[in-house]
Each structure stands twice: as structure tokens, then as C-alpha cells.
Amino acid sequence: MKFADLHLHTRFSDGTFSPEELVAQAVHHGLAAIALTDHDTVEGCAPTARECEAAGIGFITGTELTAEYDDTEVHVLGYFLDTRNERFLAEITKFQAVRQRRIHEMVARINQLGVPLQVEAVFALANCRSPGRPHVARALVQMGLIKTLDEAFDRYLKKGRPAWVPKARMSGLEAIELIHHAGGLAVMAHPGLNRTDEIIPGLVKAGLDGIECFHTKHSTAMSERYLEIADQYHLLVTGGSDCHGFSKAKPLIGTVKLPYEHVEKMTAVVIARRQAAQAAAKPVS
Ligand SMILES: [Zn+2]
Ligand SMILES: [Zn+2]
């Protein structure tokens, strides 16, 4: 049996692995293919693709966008994107800028609590365009201002704590449209984590292509439930570990293995769509 992991983060957002380290892990766990889904960026895709090629495993370009639908947060994964699509890149650059402003705001709030964290330390540690809360947590630990990453989230960073700042979100419909515009497949990430099943029909209407049935935080019962929902709405089935390296406890790569047949189904849909687009673009003779 061949398996894939289609939900992975690297240093290009809030993971700790470099592309080299990530692909070495993928090889170690015997994966046949991986997708990179860093938050609001596709920057890590080219180096990861090169590593995968050298290692002889399949690679799918991807990203994870934070969106909102009916007042609920929903993460939308994009797969098989054209990573050079201009409008797509312009849009995600805006979200990267908002992420950077959010870091300033979180650090200012931490400073107000009398904790002398320097924002430069967070940016130096993040060293990427898509910084997030895990970077703030790691900087706090690194500077000896707090003991563990969990403590950083529990005391300051998680929702409802004093340094929590809401993330900017695009609308779910915009996220789907943007991913389609870049030639990608739009997939609802970890539905079991957000428990927002009621928004699925609306997203399907907006063109959602798939649903992440297998995820580290999904129980077997949850995965089965989402497999049924995928069947009901004719959605593609995806899955991944959502590994962030050492950003969140321990690396998760290898803990969720998506049967490879689902990758083949995704590929078939992408190819059919591209052929249809090409045929539509050709002048009728
Ligand atoms: Zn997510
Ligand atoms: Zn993720």
C-alpha cells in the first residue's frame, strides 16, 4: 500500500522543519507523496519539490488559508496551485502583512503585562513572511521568559488570554475562488477540529472540492463521519498529519497516512479541469 501526507508545515510558516528535514522525515516514514500547506504562503513549495524529486517521492503544491464563513473560522487548503499565479500571490502577500502586524500587537500586549519580549527577537526567530503565534511562544521560551510552549499559549496566546489577537480572515467563498483561480483544488481542513459541519453545504455550493477526513485530531468515528459526508456531497477525500515539526510538542508526520488512491483521484480532477479549460480557450474552427 502507498500512502501520502497532505497537510504539512515548514519554517516557511510556523513549522520548524526545513524542506530538507521534512522530506527526510517523509522518506523515513515511507510516504509516497507529500503536500506542503504552509499558512498564507507557497514560498516553501519550490525547495520542497526539489527535495522530493531528489528523494523520488511525489510532491503537491499547497497552502492553508484562514477564512470565515457564517461567523465561523474555517481553514481552506489549496492543492495543485500554480505557485506563480499573480493574483493569488498578491492576495496572500496582503495576509502576510496582516500576520506581521498581528505579531507586533501580540508582543505589545505581552509587554503590557510586564514581560520584556522584544518583537525583533520574534521576527528573527520566525525568519519567514508568515509569522504566527508559535513563533511568539518559541521566542518567549528561548529568552527564558517562560518555560514551555504550552505555558506560553495557556498564559498569553490562546483565545481568551490577554495577548490573543484575532487572525485576519478572508471569506470562505473568496478563499475557494482564489484557489480555483490559481488552478487548485479547495479543501476544507480538519472539520472535526472546528466542529462546523453546518457550514459544509454552503461551502459545497461555493465550489468546495474536498474535505480533510483524516487528521491527527480526528477520532476514527470522526473520520468515518466525514467520509460519509464526502460521499454524500461527492467531495474528494484528503488527509494529513498537520505536522509543525517541533513547534507544537512532537513532529506528527507519519501519524496520519492517506491511502494513495485519494491522491490519484485528486490528480484526475485537476487534469480533467485543465483539459476542459484549454478546450474552452481554443477558438472554434
Ligand atoms: Zn488549520
Ligand atoms: Zn495546518
Image (cartoon, grey):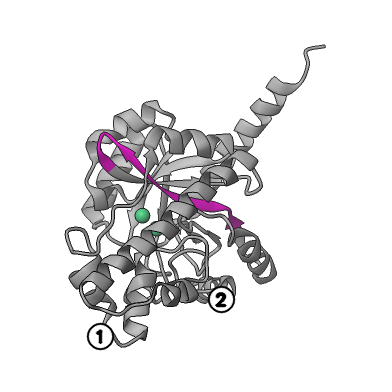
Magenta region, main secondary structure = strand
Placement of 20 over or under 206, stated as above or below: below
**In the rendered structure, which amino acid carries the disc numbered 1?**
Lys
Residue 261 shows in this picture: no
Quarter of image, ligand 1: bottom left
Residue 268 relative to residue 155: left or right: right
Residue at x 38% of width, y 73% of height? 247
Residue that sits furthest to the bottom in the current view: 144
Placement of 110 over or under 269, stated as above or below: below
What is the secondary structure assignment of the residue under circle 2?
A: helix
* Residue 218 image offset from top left, x and y in percent: 27, 56
Residue at x 23% of width, y 35% of height? 198
Judging depth in this view, the residue of 6 and 116 nearest the camera is 116
Q: How many marks?
A: 2
**In the rendered structure, which amino acid carries the disc numbered 2?**
Ala
Tag 2 or tag 1, which sits nearer the N-term? Answer: 2
The residue that disc 1 covers is: 147
Mark 1 crowdedness (10 Å alpha carbons): few <14, some 14-19, many ≥20: some
Residue at x 38% of width, y 76% of height? 118
Residue 79 shows in this picture: yes
> Where is the C terminus found, in terms of image quarters?
top right
Q: Which residues are magenta?
A: 59-72
Question: Does 250 appear in magenta?
Answer: no
C-alpha span from label 1 to label 2:
30 Å
Mark 2 crowdedness (10 Å alpha carbons): few <14, some 14-19, many ≥20: some
* Residue 191 image offset from top left, x and y in percent: 29, 47
Question: Does 61 appear in magenta?
Answer: yes
The residue that disc 2 covers is: 24
Residue at x 68% of width, y 65% of height? 50
Residue 84 relative to residue 264: left or right: right
